[in-house]
Amino acid sequence: MSKLSTPLSASLDDLPNAIVAASILPFVTTTDWLNFRLQSRKFYEIVHGHDVGAALQGFGHDVGATQQQNEDEESKALWRLALVRDYRFEQQKGDGEDDGSLMYQTIRCNPDHDDEMNPFLSTSDVFTASTAFISWKHWRKIDICLHRDEHGQQFDVSPSAQLVGPYFLRAASLWRKIEQFCSDESLTGDLGPMIQSTLHPGVPFGRSLVEEGYQDGKLSAFKAVYSFYAGQSLGDRDGMVLPGLFGGYNVYDHLSHSCWSSPEVLTGSKVVVTKDVNDLKLTVFDVESGDLGIYFRSTRSRTPGTKAVRYGNNDDQILRWFENHANLLQTYSVGRLTPGGFKSILRYPSVNDPTNCSRAVTRGVEVVASSIYAVEIGGIFVFSIRMRMLRPEEPDYMSPEERGFDTCQLVSRYWRITHEGGVEEVRGAGVVGNYPLLREGDHESLVSDDGGRTFHEEDSGEGIREEYFSYQSCTDGEEGSMEGYLQFKAGSILGGAGEVFDVRVAPFPLKFPQCYQY
């Protein structure tokens, strides 16, 4: 009876450390470990291992090297167990030097995250902890900030809403790629810093979602993404359209341009995470199921459509979708969505993605071509054709003497579209009414109202000169490929005698996205 009345910590003091560490503590909550360590030096040694041994040696205690090593290994195993159990890290196997290295990756959270200038989490605050305990401690701080109410009290959440450490590390990695893209002038010019300036600092969205009644939803990956950046400024700034993180495309009278949105309840458990400039296309996260999809509004009723594109059945759908976009950013180019319009990420594959984009050079004239599938405008393929004359410092350049002209002007086009239903051929004058005149370094956007007999320069907005002439058109939504040629006249159409020659457009695919759409 006396033994039963003995405090638990005193009873466990009589057991060897190895038995306590391997057979008892794994079945006790991590919080209780921390309570135990306050009650006896023995438990402090068990949960903190070598550190306490070193401290005791400093006070003249003789702690053997073997004992210290054993205690250190037991402590390491316990805190790695805590990382697996509390923050869903995977249990590592083996005894290699790098065993469990992911568990030591952790993040310092910002205690002043309520300040609009300071994000809750920053990609620069990811670091490698020296011990598993230190890693756990920082995840615990993030956990506390995510799951406490306005009075500072902790609230319980379901397992599907708990903090998942690896999700946060993945979120940090994808946001780091986006930051690198924005800071790379060779990829974005001045557009990247503009995009970066529109991003809102990350916030711990756990509390606000609980207030909406979603504490039992599948929120782990959602919380991770929004902890670094919590949306993007929309609308104009000093009369200038702000560039969206997800970019867009333009074809005829349809403009698509999507921004990363602060969470906005659409209906029921559905939360908007991206908005298109025309507010007809939304990327929507379902808080209850974890599904992510594209929703469309009817141009007449302005109510949510029923068509949606799903991204699998995993709890990390929003992460996988965002990771894919972060990777694709390196394959996109930047430019103006419309002549003289605002700069944007152009969501067509570029030459950095040779699988989905073609490039051909004929007599110093380069043509780059690619397409995207636009499900929101009837399921068609929108293709982009970008043409320019190469500069002297570039491969495949030809001098004016070698190519036989200083300038050349587009006359006509020919397309050969191959798909399961057969082959379709299309011929026509100019391209969407344009007859661009190319020269080294820039072009003139010339438009004809009478089939190429008279021209006027298309309004390019404050005299803006672009190296590429680019245009977009569309074809039916049937998978296949497209190729052809653009016919140019040396000099200009109205410039008298000049050779007419064909510039090849190499085959590029028309294919449905395998997993992801924007």
Image (tube, grey):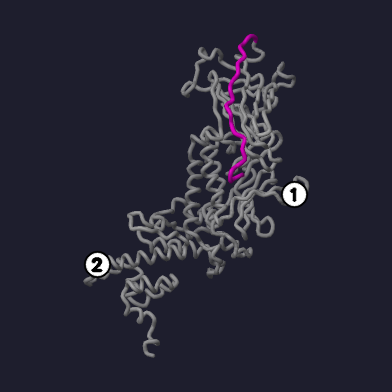
Q: Secondary structure at mark 2?
A: helix
- Whether residue 217 sits left or right of residue 145 in the image: it is right
Q: CA distance from mark 1 to mark 2?
A: 72 Å
Q: Is residue 52 visible?
A: yes
Residue visible at 51% across and 39% down in the picture: 330
* Residue 504 tag number: none
Q: Tell me the quarter of the image containing the C terminus.
A: top right
Magenta span = 496-518
Residue visible at 58% across and 51% down in the picture: 231
Q: Is residue 466 visible?
A: no
How crowded is the residue under tag 2: few (<14 C-alpha within 10 Å), some, or many (20+)? few
Tell me where residue 499 appears, x and y as whole percent: 61, 12
Tell me where residue 259 appears, x and y as whole percent: 61, 46
Residue 317's place in the image compared with 148, above or below, is above
Judging by the rendered image, the residue that carries numbered circle 2 is 66
Instruction: Say whether marks 1 and 2 touch (CB < 8 Å).
Output: no
Judging by the rendered image, the residue that carries numbered circle 1 is 302
Nearest to the observer: residue 337 or residue 483: 483
